[in-house]
Image (cartoon, helix red, strand yellow):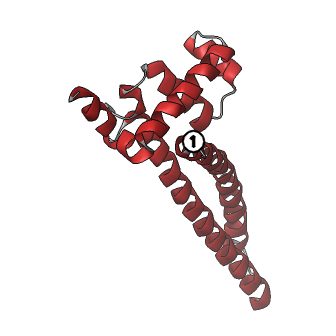
């Protein structure tokens, strides 16, 4: 059976990578729009040239809206993964069911795009150990389910036994 937890984390990693690419694209678009805008301000040429510049500025604005829409969708996926890792209130989620550094390792690897080697350096564990912890954490997330883990229901169920 496919892992729901792993699928969410992998989707979050893709979203995080896309979000970073969108940020770079927005910077380039804004620079291009500024240069086109400067061309429009000083333009005393033909109406055709002015119309052409205006169309390009409008096209850039449309592209910017499209990119910002992608970024909003990416943020929603990343937020779902963070909620699953730490709960909506920051005190539940997977981090309440497993050692917190396991959830932190998943956050660094999937949402920040760090390699297991880098995560190990930051958290003070070997990459091999962190991979084992990540696998175990994902199994716990799957055992409770992403929705229940996010809502802290796995912890509540454990408390009543």
Give the quarter of the figure containing the C terminus.
top left
Q: Position of residue 96 (x, y in %)?
A: 35, 27
Relative to 13, say whether 33 is above or below: below
Which residue is depicted at the point 63% across and 73% down?
Answer: 62
Viewer-proximal residue among 55 and 71: 71
Q: Position of residue 18 (x, y in %)?
A: 66, 51
Q: Name the residue under label 1.
A: 9
Q: Position of residue 60 (x, y in %)?
A: 68, 70
Locate residue 5 relative to residue 128 in the image: left or right.
left
Which residue is depicted at the point 69% across and 60% down?
Answer: 29
Find numbered disc 1 in the image and state the secondary structure of the residue it sits on.
helix
Relative to 79, say whether 141 is above or below: above
Q: Can residue 152 be seen from the camera position used here?
A: no
Locate residue 98 relative to residue 70 in the image: left or right.
left
Q: Quadrant of residue 34?
A: bottom right
Specify the farthest residue to the bottom.
47
Q: In which quarter of the image is residue 35?
A: bottom right
Q: Position of residue 80 (x, y in %)?
A: 45, 47
Is the residue marked by circle 1 packed among few (<14), some (14-19), or many (20+) residues within 10 Å? many
Which residue is depicted at the point 62% across and 71% down?
Answer: 61
Locate residue 85 relative to residue 13 in the image: left or right.
left
Relative to 44, say whether 96 is above or below: above
Locate residue 136 relative to residue 30 in the image: left or right.
left
């Amino acid at each position: 059976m496919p892992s729901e937890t792993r699928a969410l984390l992998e989707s979050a990693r893709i979203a995080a990578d896309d979000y970073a690419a969108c940020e770079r694209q927005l910077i380039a678009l804004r620079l291009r729009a500024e240069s086109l805008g400067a061309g429009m301000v000083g333009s005393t040429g033909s109406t055709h040239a002015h119309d052409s510049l205006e169309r390009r500025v409008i096209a850039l604005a449309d592209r910017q809206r499209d990119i910002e829409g992608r970024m909003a969708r990416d943020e929603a996926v990343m937020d779902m993964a963070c909620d699953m890792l730490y709960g909506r209130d920051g005190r539940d989620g997977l981090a309440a069911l497993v050692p917190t550094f396991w959830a932190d390792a998943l956050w660094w690897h999937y949402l920040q795009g760090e390699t297991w080697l880098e995560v190990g350096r930051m958290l003070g564990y070997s990459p091999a150990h962190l991979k084992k912890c990540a696998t175990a954490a994902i199994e716990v997330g799957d055992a409770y389910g992403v929705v229940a883990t996010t809502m802290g229901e796995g912890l509540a169920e454990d408390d009543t036994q």
